[in-house]
Every structure is written in structure tokens, then in C-alpha cells.
Image: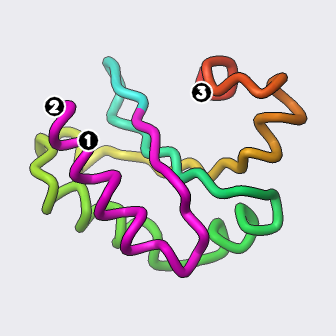
Amino acid sequence: MADAHDAAERLLVDLLADSAVRSVRFVTGPLPVAVWLVVENDAEAQELRSRSDIEDIVSRALRRAGLPSRDVEGFRVVVQSEETVTRDYEGSWFYALR
């Protein structure tokens, strides 16, 4: 699964480079996968959230990367900025992702 997540991250960073996506984090568990798109600041996060094609881009990338269909069909997208994590979560992605 790690290989599929790595492949999906590379695809998404490439496909969303115009929206300043720096990295991607995945939260998995009993619920469908959550795909966290990481940008530098809050303004970039707000702009990315306003794009109407994000879920389609993420879906295509997850499928191309070979994630299981249960993850592809039920995923959710979260956009988060490093700025928010630093300000609201003391710089801890562990706390931000919870």
C-alpha cells in the first residue's frame, strides 16, 4: 500500500503544481481514506478549496496509482496549509491529522 500512496502523492503533486500543492498525506483506517493536500499558506489553501475539479483529479490519481477501489470510491479531500498547522497545532502534523 505504501507504494501506491507514494505513487499517488507524486501524481497529485505533479497534477496540482499550479495550485502550490507541496505534499500529500493519507489517513487510512476503518473509514475511507482521507487525502490531505498540503500547501504553504492559508491563501493557497483557500484558493485550492475553491477549485471545482479537485475530487476528480484526486480520484484519477488514486486509480492510476493502484489504490484499492474501496479507497478510491469513498475518499475525502482535506486541504491544509503549513501555516495553519504551525499556528493552530504547534507545528505538529500528528495533531492536525487527528
Q: Which secondary structure, mark 3?
A: loop
The residue where tag 3 is placed is: 97
Name the amino acid, label 1.
His
Say which quadrant the N terminus sits in: top left
Q: Which of the two labelled residues, at mark 2 and mark 3, occupies the earlier sequence position?
A: 2
User: Residue 85: x percent and y percent?
Assistant: 76, 35
Label 2 near label 1: C-beta < 8 Å? yes
The residue where tag 1 is placed is: 5
The residue that appears at 75% across and 66% down in the rendered structure is 46
The magenta stretch spans residue 23: yes
User: Residue 86: x percent and y percent?
Assistant: 82, 34
Q: Please state the total of marks drawn on the protein image.
A: 3
Classify residue 93 by image quadrant. top right
Residue 1, disc:
2
Q: CA distance from mark 2 to mark 3?
A: 19 Å
Name the amino acid, label 2.
Met
Residue numbers of the magenta segment? 1-26
